[in-house]
Amino acid sequence: MTAMIAIHVVFIRDFISADLEMKKSAITFVEKEVEDAPSDDIIIDFSNVKSITREFAHQYLMSKRKIKKEIHEVNIPSHVESIINKAQKSINR
C-alpha cells in the first residue's frame, strides 16, 4: 500500500478577488485558507488575478513566512510576479 499525499489547492482569486489590494485580506487569506488547510502541502493558484498592490504582496509574503507548511504558487501572471519579486527583495534587505 502506498501512502497518499494530500495537496490542497487554493484559488486566491476565489477567496479574495481578481484584484489583490488590502493588507488585511492577505493576512486573512493566509490564516484562514492556508494555515487552516487540512494539508501541509499547499498550492496557491493565481489564475485570473488582474492586479496586486505592493502592500498586499509584502503582507502575503510576511504572513506566509510564519506558517509551517510547504507553499507553492502557480499560474502567476508576469505583472503580478514582478510585484511579488519586488516585495521579496525589500523583505530580504
Image: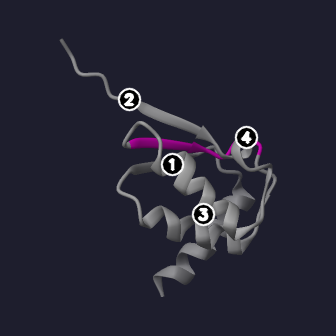
The residue labelled by disc 4 is 14
Residue in front for this viewpoint, 51 or 78: 51
Q: Is residue 42 left or right of residue 19?
A: left
Answer with the quarter of the image where residue 86 lies.
Answer: bottom right
As drawn, the label of residue 34 is 1
Q: Is residue 37 left or right of residue 57?
A: left
The residue labelled by disc 3 is 27
Answer with the quarter of the image where residue 14 lies.
Answer: top right
Q: Position of residue 36 (x, y in %)?
A: 47, 46
Name the amino acid type tagged 3: Ile
Q: Dot 4, crowdedness within 10 Å: few (<14), some or many (≥20)?
A: few
Residue in front for this viewpoint, 76 or 67: 67
As drawn, the label of residue 6 is 2
Tell me which label, 2 or 1, sits earlier in the chain. 2
- Outermost residue, bottom side: 93
4 part of magenta stretch:
no
